[in-house]
């Protein structure tokens, strides 16, 4: 009798598993069309910062297209690696996704002993934005251009404070790159994101930041901080008065912080395609594109807005930056 029941239970469990896999591969979870409930979008840094700002703009636009709320959850810590770890460990059903960037999904892999694999434990969905950094200083700092900043830093070696979002964050690596090219020395002060770091730059508690344009431009526009250069070959259309690093005298200091969306490994293709379609629709929206432009963000190419496109871009960035970061021997604080 017990044997008969065990076999029957075994068959029933096998059948349930097959039906779940079939349902998942048909974009249905628990038999329901995806999405049938709210989606969590994990943001790896503090609220109010550049990644949070982009995440919220995107969440608003994709929830309209998915027909379900997309809720932001800020999970900061260890330069964003905690949040990406949460995404990597989440159920691969499309209801937990994360926004990441150059730091969280490339640089962190060369700095932290991550408990997950940045490439194999995460499913790329789409690249969503790309933008340069701004070399920003507090308004009372005795430097009004990049040459004066370098002279001031050289006159005060190791004294200045630069705000970052932790070791390996975009703000940190931008600063390390600047030190390397200019031969200057200053200290890095880690925050849970460049949102809180910006509060201290505005207050003059830190002296400079290598910050994403989306975070600095609003403060530059209201005169709370000074922008000395943009880390790109061309000026920002939304801030044509800020010189490029080449024009300002630090040739070749090009740093772009790109953002993407990832899901857990094993998320079914149908669900990834639905998420990607909603993102592509959102990125085509005129109002969103205007908002991104105001924040100094470029919308990626249509190829980059695909899972394969993001995977290829991330791979190329890993090839480029891991040797640089490893040579610089950057370690967690
Ligand atoms: C943030 O949102 O705080 C930034 O993306 C952090 C960083 O500079 O990496």
Image (cartoon, rainbow, N blue to C red):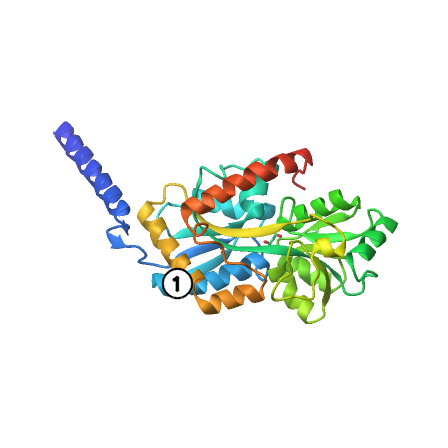
At 66% across and 66% down in the image, what residue appears? 240
In this rendering, position of residue 227 left or right of residue 26? right
The residue closer to the viewer here, 74 or 61, is 61
Q: Please, is residue 123 above or below residue 292 in the view?
A: above
Question: In the image, what residue occupies the spot 46% across and 43% down?
Answer: 311
Q: Quadrant of the C terminus?
A: top right
Q: Secondary structure at mark 1?
A: helix
Q: Position of residue 19 (x, y in %)?
A: 21, 43
Residue 106 position, x and y percent, is 55, 42
Viewer can see residue 251? yes
Q: Which residue is mark 1?
A: 63
Residue 292 rendering spot, x and y as whole percentages: 53, 63
Q: Quadrant of the N terminus?
A: top left
Left or right, 12 with respect to 36, comes to left
Q: Is residue 329 above or below residue 229?
A: above
Image label count: 1
Residue 112 visible? The answer is: no
Q: Is mark 1 within 8 Å of ligand 1?
A: no
Question: Is 12 situated above or below 36?
Answer: above
Residue 33 lies in quadrant: bottom left
- Residue depicted at 58% across the width and 59% down the height: 50
Q: Is residue 96 left or right of residue 170?
A: left
Local packing at callout 1 (Cα closer than 10 Å; few below 14, some 14-19, many 20+) is: some
Residue 102 drawn at (x, y percent)? 56, 47
């Amino acid at each position: 009798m017990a044997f008969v029941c065990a076999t029957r239970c075994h068959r029933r469990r096998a059948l349930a598993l097959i039906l779940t896999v079939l349902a998942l591969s048909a974009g249905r979870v628990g038999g329901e069309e995806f999405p049938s409930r709210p989606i969590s979008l994990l943001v790896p840094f503090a609220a109010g910062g550049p990644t949070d700002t982009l995440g919220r703009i995107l969440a608003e636009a994709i929830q309209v297209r998915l027909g379900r709320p997309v809720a932001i959850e800020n999970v900061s810590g260890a330069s964003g690696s905690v949040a990406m770890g949460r995404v990597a460990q989440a159920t691969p059903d499309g209801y937990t996704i994360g926004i990441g960037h150059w730091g969280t999904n490339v640089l962190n892999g060369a700095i932290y002993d991550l408990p997950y694999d940045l490439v194999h434990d995460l499913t790329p969905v789409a690249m969503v934005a790309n933008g340069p950094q701004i070399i920003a200083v507090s308004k009372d700092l005795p430097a009004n251009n990049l040459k004066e900043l370098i002279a001031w830093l050289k006159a005060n070696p190791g004294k200045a404070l630069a705000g970052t979002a932790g070791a390996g964050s975009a703000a940190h690596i931008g600063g390390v790159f600047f030190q390397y090219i200019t031969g200057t020395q200053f200290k890095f002060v880690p925050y849970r994101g460049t949102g809180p770091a910006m509060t201290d730059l505005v207050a003059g508690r830190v002296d400079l930041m290598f910050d994403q344009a989306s975070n600095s431009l609003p403060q530059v526009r209201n005169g709370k901080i000074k922008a000395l250069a943009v880390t790109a070959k061309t000026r920002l259309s939304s801030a044509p008065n800020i010189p490029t690093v080449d024009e300002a005298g630090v040739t070749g200091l090009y740093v772009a912080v790109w953002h993407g969306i990832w899901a857990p490994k094993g998320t079914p293709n149908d669900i990834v395609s639905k998420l990607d379609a909603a993102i592509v629709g959102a990125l085509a929206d005129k109002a969103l594109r205007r908002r991104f432009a105001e924040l100094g963000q470029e919308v990626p190419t249509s190829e980059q807005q695909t899972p394969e496109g993001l995977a290829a871009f991330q791979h190329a960035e890993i090839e480029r930056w891991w040797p640089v970061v490893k040579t610089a021997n950057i370690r967690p604080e």
